[in-house]
Image (cartoon, rainbow, N blue to C red):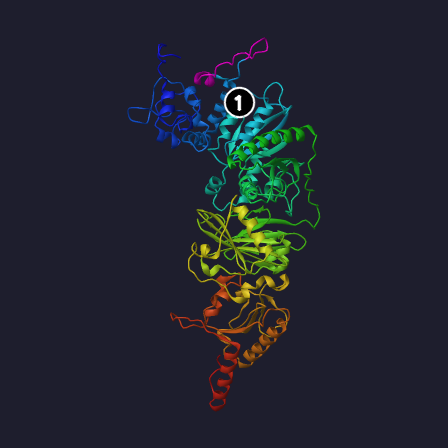
Amino acid sequence: MGASEPSHPPRSRANALLERYGGENGPTGHASAGNSCEPVSLSSFIGGQAKAAPLGKLEGDGRTYTGDSTPDDFQRLPGLAKEGSLASFLAKREQELHPELSRAATSEAAVTQEVPAADGPNAPAPEKPAPSSDEKKTTPPLHRSTTGKEIVVLISGSGSNLQALIDATCGDSPRIPGAHIGRVISNRKNAYGLERAKNVNPAIPTVVHSLKTYQTRNPGKTRDDYDLVLAEKVLGDGRVPDLVVLAGFMHIVSETFLSAMGHATSLAEAPATVKRPAHPVPVINLHPALPGTFDGTHAIERAYEAFQAGKIEHTGVMVHEVVAEVDRGAPILVRPVPIVKDELLEDLETRMHAVEHEILVAAVADILSGARTLTTSTVPPPKATQDATTFLRLDAQGHWIPIAQPLIVYEDDVVWVRGTSSVVWLGRHAKRTIPGDAQACVQRGSTEHQGLESAVFLRAVGGLLATMLGARDSKPADHRLFIVRSDVDGTWIDEVPVCAASLCTAFSAVLVTPQGVHVWHGVGSDDVQQQRAVEWARGLAPMHHGIDTAALLALVDGHEMADGWHHRHHAALPPDVRQAQLYAPALEPTAVPFAWARVSSAQVSIIDARLEIYVVVGANARGDRAALVQALDRAEALAAAHVRGAPMRAPVHVLEAPSLVPLDLHVLARDPWNEHISTAGAVPNSLVLMNVRSLAEARAALAEEGCSGSAASGGSPRV
């Protein structure tokens, strides 16, 4: 146009900002959804305190603006879509803080998107303007059915997958016909999915069941106890649901939960609950990975990293049946998702979430319609014969109540394993007055004591026994340490004092702190122990972290741990000879598992750890020269016999009471509270030191005392 033409109309505030801050490549943009023009500072918006605010100003305090530019003016600024711009950062920030507003903004943008102009009868009709904030508030919620097959959905977060199921079960032509969502259960009270459940007509009933709150209100209760209550809430008070969906539920359900839902598990007996259904309730989970890949948390991030490393070309999403092993249930629907070169992780996540919503709805529809049959099987009812084994715990009122496996016991517990061969387990602080038929077990000696359990008992309880410190009704400590040790008969998981002296490189350990759950594996810990430690950690929290020795020692008291050569080579031993054996007295032909309670101060005993051997001289056996010589001879013979197939000959040590116990010996027993036998005979209030010699030193001392004894009568031989 020529100079004589009229001047341009005044520019809008949005155009002014665009020009001032770098034109189309600048950072300026509108980073929120909705049409609110309330003056809110940029710093407040970044901090998550604002839900909708225009950005920027040219004069005044430099933070707020209440001018006449519309939010749409700001939405169209190119800086909003430019990767790395301030506006794109703010938009992403809002999506994280307010997913519900971002969803509304996305829908609004889709409605108001401009289309090219066209002539003729086929030209598109003008788009309707986006609804105002007031119009949005008055939009009636979706109408849902309350009849048909019932779905129970478990969530933990924003509930976008729940929303996909809500959308698919509402309206005149639902994608999941003849079904409704009967309940939504969350393990987090602030989960936005609870609001989604309320935003339908009628509102979907919601329940909050938090593990932390449950254990705070019920001191001493375990995750299995929590899962049993969770199952009861899922089953409800009315009809049994037709399907349970874990939609972003950040809690690993246990076999106790699955058994209570009617599933077949490895538990010897189903947990006691009056609500257990006669037929198994299908339980499914959505997982953003292909079967057998990237189990557990952060699956999308791990797949993205694997792609960057050139290990994979695509990932995927699956809906699968829920079993005890995390993300290892039979796949129901699987959808591969390619990973695009040079795409950002956020872009992959967006595409994955879209596939998640689609595949979850399709899987639920197929299951409820009968198009897909699940493999879930029913637990057969226990046989009404003497072969059925039940596990009962004596409560504070003197009643026997059923408990589930794995068997988790406390120091004050009395547990009755009732079956063909009944036995009573007694914690170290358990009451000795036992009512009913269980008293007969105690009278005939059919008892197992904490820290001294036999291999027969371990097999009878399913091959896993976990012992806790303190009383069952006591509040769990903030810091807890568990030692995991296995042999051919099963696994012991023992809670121990949180100190370095409890640790041993032959075993694995699980440490619980306010910062999380940590798993550590000693260099001598084998694959079985490591797997059991990981499984135990998963039972304590949804996520755990691996930790090295230096980091572990920084979190516990003390710095000295059992790190002997024989512990480091523990995994090289056959599983059936890994548990230390005790010969008490030393010439006893049959060994028993080593425990301090079985060591007598009146005897000379041998502790055979296969790669290391200890001769323990009781305080009242120091004068028995013949027994000591025989013990040394047998210990040397055992070391010679073990050398075949071993990396070296086992050294022999001699511990003479009173003496402190070396750490390498201390960790071999599961009853350290009985270790006082080693200090028996000490002068009261005197300082007890470590009195340990090698085999050669012990023989030399005996020879020297033998010469002295021939010259003078009296005295007792000492090593």
Q: Local crowd at mark 1 within 10 Å, few (<14), some, or many (≥20)?
A: some
What secondary structure is the stretch in magenta mostly built from?
A: loop
- Residue 188 location, x and y as percent? 48, 36
**Total numbered labels:** 1
Q: From this viewpoint, which residue is outermost toward the left? A: 60
Q: Amino acid at mark 1?
A: Val
Q: Would you identify the image quadrant in which residue 185 lies? A: top right
Q: Position of residue 629 (x, y in %)?
A: 56, 80
The picture places residue 717, in percent across and down from the top left corner, at 49, 82
Image quadrant holding the N terminus, namely: top left
Q: Is residue 111 visible?
A: yes
Is residue 73 left or right of 506 when viewed as pictured? left
- Residue sitting nearer the eye, 127 or 330: 127
Q: Residue furthest front?
A: 2
Q: Is residue 25 left or right of residue 642?
A: left
Q: Is residue 519 above or below residue 326?
A: below
Q: Is residue 260 covered in magenta?
A: no
Give the answer, above or below, for where 76 lies relative to 434.
Answer: above
What span is in magenta? 118-137
For residue 31, above or below residue 598: above
In the depicted view, which residue is nearer to us: 624 or 150?
Answer: 150
Identify residue for label 1.
Answer: 200
Q: Which percent across, then down, holds residue 308?
A: 55, 42
